Amino acid sequence: MSSGAKAWLGALREVYVLFESPLGHAFLGSLQGENSGATPLDDMPHAAKGRKVALNFTTPSAVARSLLQRLKARSLPVEGLEGFSDSQPLPISWGEILPLTYLRSYGKLPPVVPMSFPLRRFNHSAEMFDELLLLGSEIGQFLDQLPQRVLWLVSADLAHTHLKTGPYGYCPCAQPYDDACSKWAAAGGSLEALQDAKEYQRKGAMSCGFTGLVALQGFLKAAGWKGTVLANEHPTYYGMMVAKFSPVAFVV
């Protein structure tokens, strides 16, 4: 991670985190007060054998319920997730643990409102475009009304078809897809660049994180934001991008 990204994450204090993971079965918002899990890293490049990463975080249940109610009132197909009558932590895995570990590295992890996207992202994410823009717009308006500061964190790995030897094979659309995502982020949310990414996704980029980018665009398009791309690489078969977005009024 770049020194700029480390400094930015290290400055986060007194915030809520809205965390979006692509690894879900439906549009889900967790209502559980406690969340806990551990994930093995045996299949990760350069990871020590037998190593596991554990993580616990709390969810501000009242905020999560209010967000769920707003989205349902807009007829969006979102469900709440709660287990064990909220008497014990809800299990989480690598889709939540690994991204949030980066935040934990720079201090106590703030309260997190986790959300996930449905299984149809695999084959129909391009067709979900308009629905995701609406979802993001509604989430953004809700967050704007909160008295707390909020970090909207999107876990969105890019094209999964960079290598012939990878599990999804190779597609010449992979690098153009990742490039379009960089262009989108650098522009602070370019709808034109995201439309380009959508076409590469349709051709076979196989980015499970595309849905999260479109949802975030639903909010970014409503206000002036400055985007900065901190990294965009594909050290293995899938691309990864780190970018940040700041309100233009706050940029110095």
Image (cartoon, helix red, strand yellow):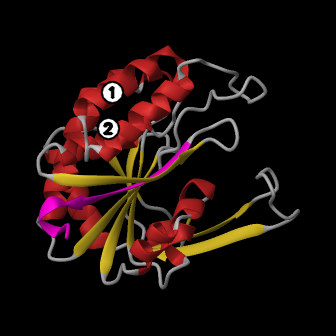
Residue 92 visible here: no
**Contact, mark 1 vs mark 2 (Cβ under 8 Å):** yes
- Residue closer to the observer: 147 or 62: 147
Q: Residue, x 38% and y 76% (percent of image)? A: 111
**At 30% across and 77% down in the image, what residue appears?**
15
Q: What residue do we see at 54% from left, 69% from top?
A: 102
Mark 1 or mark 2: whose residue is earlier in sequence: 1
Q: Which residue is mark 1?
A: 128
* Relative image position of residue 26 (x, y in whole percent): 42, 40
Q: Is residue 229 above or below residue 183?
A: below
Image-based side of 38 in relation to 231, left or right: right
Secondary structure state at the residue bearing disc 2: helix
Is residue 246 located in the magenta-colored stretch of the structure?
yes
Disc 1 marks a residue whose amino acid type is Met
**Mark 2 = which residue?**
214
Question: Which quadrant would the N terminus be assigned to in this image?
Answer: bottom right
Majority secondary structure of magenta residues: strand
Give amino acid for label 2.
Val
250 left or right, relative to 38: left
Callout 1: SS: helix
Q: Is residue 208 visible?
A: yes
Please check the rendered image and state whether residue 25 is part of the magenta-colored stretch, yes or no.
no
Q: Which residues lie in the magenta part?
A: 240-252
